[in-house]
Amino acid sequence: MILIGGTATNGIDDSLSKILSVPSVKVENKIFPDGESYIRIPISVKNEEVVLVQTTDYPQDKHLIELFLMSETIKDLGAKKLTVIVPYLAYSRQDRRFKDGEAVSVKTILHLLSEVGIDSLVVVEPHKPEEISHFRGEIKIVHPYIQLSRKIRELTTNPFILAPDRGALERARQIAEDLGASYSYIEKERDRNTGEVRIKDIPNMTLKDKDVVIVDDIISTGGTVAQASKLAYSLGAKSVIAAAVHLLLSNNAKERLVQAGVKNIIGTNTVKTEDKDIIVVDISYSIASVL
Ligand code: R5P
């Protein structure tokens, strides 16, 4: 197996190299004066099984184009099999037409990935596992819950896992069961024009003396978790922690979370995070286990 680190890996290629005891090489990349990306695969891949790592965090469009260029080049150069690991799949939340005329973006991205020679696609925590079926080759999904629950165990004494919407309930259940904790979900509505989130009240729930951990796939503007945190405190929570697989933290998301009383923010290395206050867990072991 030849392991190639793409233009955005957040160190996952290096971790996989150590875990799997296979050497890894970095793709050659520069930006032309007009802003276009240059890609070169610096080793022979003829008749080899190649694993390429490329996340598609910010700047998403650039990382996606580079992924298309790298993938097709590897197959053009004669690779026998190409497996691509995409730790964070951009555009995955636009999985349907919420308003008439909208692009179903994740469908287009996965159709394009199907056209550039990828035989097997590994995606960490896609927004909805069923959306990945738009990819036409083999698909493997990674849920890095073990790493998240290990960190939650370290930081809490009386954890309660809260899903910030019904769609996040299965994730909350799995993490709660790993911790031996209780769990539940709340219901949210998002205004499709302003993006603002509203959480419905839950009259009969009590979170008295609980270390509430709000677990989601993505934190972007922080609106969902901030609203959920305020509700958790109003229901008696002792403390609130936010944990998400993909911490996009757009604009002033971190400040928003802190103002809503969130004590710790836990994320993973699927997305680049330079903020030292954020707790980042490496999910490479979960990826290695599906390779
Ligand atoms: C939505 O369905 C996702 O699972 C997340 O809850 C959402 O993307 C979080 O976005 P934000 O942080 O902007 O509220």
Image (cartoon, rainbow, N blue to C red):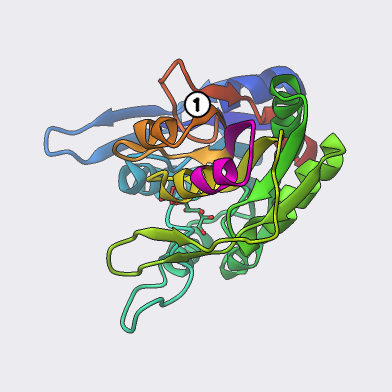
Q: Residues within 10 Å of mark 1 (few under 14, many from 20)?
A: many
- Quick check: is 35 in the magenta stretch? no
The image quadrant where one finds the N terminus is top right
Q: Position of residue 97 (x, y in %)?
A: 41, 77
Q: Position of residue 60 (x, y in %)?
A: 36, 45
Q: Position of residue 192 (x, y in %)?
A: 35, 69
Q: Quadrant of residue 252?
A: top left
Q: Quadrant of residue 133?
A: bottom right
Q: Is residue 96 above or below residue 247?
A: below
Going by the picture, which residue comes out furthest to the left?
34
Residue 38 seen in render? yes
Q: Is residue 201 above or below residue 252?
A: below
Residue drawn at point x = 56 percent, y = 69 percent: 134
In the figure, is residue 54 to the left or right of 232? left
Residue 78 seen in render? no
- Quick check: is 231 in the magenta stretch? yes
State yes or no: Cβ of the residue under disc 1 lies below 8 Å from any atom of ligand 1. no
Going by the picture, which residue comes out furthest to the bottom?
100
Residue drawn at point x = 74 percent, y = 20 percent: 154
Q: Quadrant of residue 131?
A: bottom right
The image quadrant where one finds the C terminus is top right
Q: Start and end of the magenta stretch?
A: 230-243
Q: Nearer the viewer, residue 136 or 176?
A: 176
Identify residue type, mark 1: Asn
Residue drawn at point x = 33 percent, y = 76 percent: 102
Secondary structure, mark 1, is loop
Q: Nearer the viewer, residue 113 or 74?
A: 113
Q: Nearer the viewer, residue 137 or 164?
A: 164
Residue labelled with disc 1: 10
